[in-house]
Image (cartoon, rainbow, N blue to C red):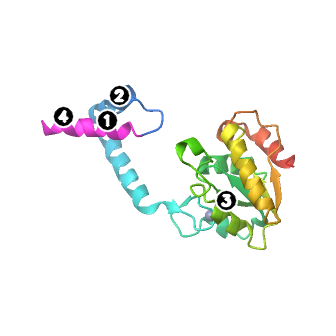
Amino acid sequence: MSSTNALEVLIQALRRLPGVGVKSAQRMAFHLMQHDRAGAEALSVALHDAVQNVHHCARCHTFTEDDICSTCLNPERDASRLCVVESPADQSALERTGAFKGLYFVLMGRLSPLDGIGPKEIGLHKLMERASDGVVQEVILATNFNAEGEATAHVLSEALKSRGLHVTRLARGVPVGSELEYVDLGTIAHALVDRR
Ligand SMILES: [Zn+2]
C-alpha cells in the first residue's frame, strides 16, 4: 500500500514541472523506477543540492551559489551598461552571442497583472537602486517581444527615465511574440547592436 503511495507522490511531484501533464509524469516515474534507478538517485541528490545551495545574486538576481555571481564580480565586464532580461535563460541566450560585455539585471519574470505579478514581484525597486549606482550609463531593456514583455519594457522605461537614466530597447530584428531564449544568436546580436 505504501509503495503505491510513494509512486503517486512522485507522479504528483513531477507534474509540477512546466509542460508536464499526468501522462508524461507517469511515464517519467515508471521509467525511472523500472529502468534507471541510478538516474533517479542522481536526480534526487541534484535536486536536493540545488534547493540547498542555489539562490539569487545580491546584485543581479540571477541564480548563483555565491552571494554575488561571477558575472557581476568579473572586472572585465563593462559596468556602465546594464541589460535587463526576464530570466536566466534569456541571459544565457545573450551571453552566447558574445556581443554584450556589460552587466545584467534579471527580473525573474515579467509584469503580468492578471497573474498577480506586479512591479514588486519583478524587483522594480531593486532595479532602480541598481541602475542608479552612478556607474551605469545605459540600461538596455531586453525583455521578450510579446505583449507582456513589451508592457514590462514600457513600465521599466518610464520608471528608469524618470530617474534621468539613458534607456534603450533591443531592436526589432527579433520576431514579434518570440521568447529570446529560442531566437537564433545572430538575430539577438543584431538586435543588440541596433538597439535604440
Ligand atoms: Zn550577479
Residue 170 at what x, y percent from top left? 79, 46
Query: Residue type at mark 4?
Result: Thr
**Callout 2, which amino acid?**
Arg
Whether residue 156 sits left or right of residue 25 in the image: it is: right
Instruction: Point out the tag, 2 or 1, that comes first from the N-terminus.
Output: 1
**Mark identifier at residue 11:** 1
Whether pointer 3 and pointer 4 mark residues with C-beta atoms closer than 8 Å, the reply is: no
Ligand 1 image-quadrant field: bottom right
| Residue depicted at x 36% and y 32% | 25
Q: Label 1: state its secondary structure.
A: helix
- At 65% from the left and 70% from the top, the residue drawn is 73
Please state the horizontal and vertical placement of residue 27, each as a whole percent of the image.
Answer: 35, 28
Q: Name which of mark 2 and mark 4 comes first in the sequence.
A: 4
Q: Is residue 90 magenta?
A: no
Mark 3 surroundings: few (<14), some (14-19) or many (≥20) residues within 10 A: many
Mark 3 or mark 4, earlier in chain: 4
Q: Which residues are magenta?
A: 1-16
Disc 3 element:
strand
Q: Are marks 1 and 3 in contact (CB under 8 Å)?
A: no
* Residue bearing the label numbered 4: 4
Residue 143 showing in the rendered view = no
Q: Secondary structure at mark 2?
A: helix
Secondary element at image label 4: helix
**Residue type highlighted by circle 1:** Ile
Query: How far is mark 2 from mark 3, CA to CA?
Result: 38 Å
Residue to which mark 2 is pinned? 27
* Residue closer to the observer: 189 or 113: 113
Q: Are marks 2 and 1 in contact (CB under 8 Å)?
A: no
Q: CA distance from mark 4 to mark 1?
A: 11 Å
